[in-house]
Image: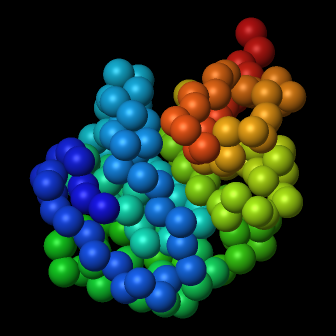
Amino acid sequence: MRIIGGSLRGLRLNPPKNLPVRPTTDLAKEALFNILQNQIDFEGIDVLDLFSGTGNISMEFASRGAEKVISVDRSIHCVHYLKDCAKQHGLLQIKTYKEDVFKYLNIESDKYDLIFADPPYDLNRIPELPKIVFERNILKEDGLLIVEHQSMQNLANYPQFVEQRKYGHSSFSFFRPVVTP
């Protein structure tokens, strides 16, 4: 794993092997950030990283100038690893929380420019994520929700669904708030 852009470009991340994670591959992450750099100015955005795991995505956003990155994972080992990495590299905008993502979403009231969710692929509640995010109204009006999931899974049945991009067995589904005139 490595940071592919921003102030920490090229930094290799070497998390402990015993973390309960399936990190986003460098290939998929690079493709995702190529898409995003044409849609988003990373400077100053607020990001919510759900199921943050190693913090690979959180650190990428922070490296590219995000103002606030909230990282939520239920593994205390993942949270400690990310907190230590962020401190070591001066990424003070990353705040970590050890919490069940669904419980966290039910109490979150801040609004974000971008929400990224990378749940375990075998989690049967993945389709609930867009529903909860939009019901809780925690995405800014021009915000973006991205859910990483298995390519065979289809999340297109939401009115906020924009597109799905496939990268082998992994896919990113993109959602935006429906703005009514």
Residue extending farthest to the top is 181
Residue shown at 52%/59% (left/top)?
Answer: 49
Q: Is residue 176 visible?
A: no
In the depicted structure, whether residue 62 falls above or below residue 151: below
Residue shown at 34%/30% (left/top)?
Answer: 34
User: Looking at the image, how many numbered discs can be counted on the residues?
Assistant: 0
Q: At which x and y percent is residue 12?
A: 20, 65
The image quadrant of residue 162 is top right
- Left or right position of 143 against 25: right
In the depicted structure, whether residue 144 falls above or below residue 137: above
Residue shown at 41%/68% (left/top)?
Answer: 55
- Left or right position of 172 against 18: right
Residue extending farthest to the front is 168
Image quarter in which the N terminus is found: bottom left
The image quadrant of residue 51 is bottom right
Judge by depth and name the residue closer to the eye, 167 or 128.
167
In the depicted structure, whether residue 43 falls above or below residue 88: above
- Left or right position of 96 against 41: right
Q: At which x and y percent is residue 38?
A: 35, 22
Residue shown at 64%/35% (left/top)?
Answer: 173
Q: At which x and y percent is residue 54?
A: 43, 72
Q: How is the image coloured?
A: rainbow
Image quarter in which the C terminus is found: top right
Q: At which x and y percent is residue 65?
A: 25, 48
In the depicted structure, whether residue 112 falls above or below residue 37: below
Judge by depth and name the residue closer to the eye, 51 or 112.
51
Q: Is residue 128 visible?
A: yes
